Image: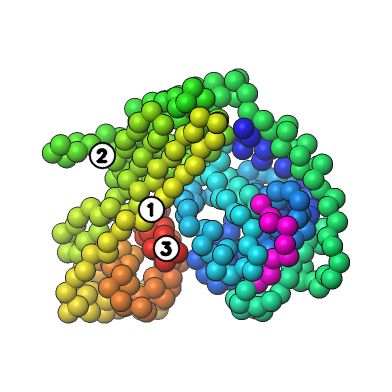
Amino acid sequence: MINKRLLIKNLLSHNDENSFYDKKRKIDISFKEGKAKFLKHICALSNSNPKNNSYIVIGVEDEDNNIVGVDFFDDSKIQNLINAYLTNPPIVQYENIPFPHLPDDKVVGLVTIRPIDKITSLRKNIWKYYGGSVFFRDGSISMPKVFDIEVKDVNSKIVAAIENHAQNNIQLTLDGVFDFLNKRQDFNPQYQVFKEYFVLCWSGQKKQVKDEVFFSRVDIELINEQVRLFYSALDEVSISYTEDSFKIIEYVRLGLYQSYKYYKLEETTIHFDNNANYSISADLIFQPPQFDKRVLHHIYNANNSILEKLEKSLSLNKNETADLKNLASSYLICYLNRFDDALLKLEAAKPYIRNESEILYQSYKETIRILRKVKYS
């Protein structure tokens, strides 16, 4: 089993990006440009390495390889995006890798691209790239090219050596467990061993509501691979497990006018097998709350008024300042109730919310995360 933190270190030791590895400070697939560029790199790396894995490391400074991290990205449906836009799509996996020096809410993103030994191309137009375009790596750059010959396999031995040097061992596993227990000691850290092989650590603030137990500030890591499987700073989570599985049900808090309820968002189950393999299944179980359209029209117009003031650098009154705290979530509710333009308004509000406060921006990012899951599903 590969220790993904060690794998990233080995990849970064190849200082220059090349035809099997790329590094990014960040990606943003919530906008067309960012989505298009991400798809271009996936396409290019898959075509340039038909016989072996390729990787993208996210959260690293390009100049000096300084690991600065990015937000936790938990979209299990990213393969849906790949399948929708690419012909002969590779198998793509996005994993969140914690590093000890990073803050709790930051990780390094690791994208693993497994080709299917066929030429991958864009299925349809996106941003400035045309459907049918084929990309390859030219050194460290993803370029559109036309190839009518077989691509030479020049990286398999190099990639195999990098992966072999990243194999996990008992010391790395034990160090990972102790690191987790020490770092999360304020949130009741625990560990569980599955199939005498997999070590899973988890922590969270416990809260009991009637007969049900929920957790917030949940952190779940598979220590064998140094992969963070789940992280949430705000939402409520229920946790259960058996001898061979670990289940997480995530809830989101939504509502209007100080009347809020918790709604089930996603159910994630980690299955551990006897053959030292595991699989993760994630099912969106979200049923969007429906509200009176007249009420939503009033809230939507009020939000638009606040956004217009922010765009013109005008001061907000007391009520508008209070409403700003719920602007992102109320735009989300409007969008879920078929106010299609609410999505554009939500995107336009991002820079103003980010400048307002870190707490407010964190809430905005949680809203975008919910929206991303709903859209891709």
Choose top left, top right, bottom left or bottom right for residue 296.
bottom left
Helix, strand or loop at mark 1: strand
- Can you give x and y, in whole percent of width and height, for residue 314 in the image? 35, 75
> Which residue is drawn at the image coordinates 83% and 60% (left, top)?
151
For marks 3 and 2, the one nearer the N-term is 2
- Residue displayed at 67% across by 44% down: 66
Q: Is residue 336 left or right of residue 70?
A: left
Q: Residue at 43% x, 40% y: name it.
A: 270
* Depicted 178 relative to depicted 227: above or below: above
Q: Quadrant of residue 46?
A: bottom right
Left or right, residue 28 beside residue 54: left
Q: Is residue 161 above or below residue 43?
A: above
Q: Magenta stretch containing residue 72, yes or no?
A: no
**Which of label 2 and label 1 is nearer to you?**
1
Residue numbers of the magenta segment: 114-122
Q: Is residue 179 visible?
A: no
Given this view, does label 3 or label 2 mark the residue nearer the observer?
Answer: 3
| Quadrant, the C terminus | bottom left
Question: Is the Cβ of the residue at disc 3 closer than 8 Å to that at disc 1?
Answer: no
User: Which residue of the protein is positioned furthest toward the left in this rendering?
Assistant: 210
Q: Which mark is residue 283?
A: 1
The residue that label 2 is drawn on is 214
Q: Which corner quadrant holds the N terminus?
A: top right
**Residue 80 placed where, x, y %?**
51, 62
Q: Which residue is mark 3?
A: 377
* Dot 2 amino acid type: Phe
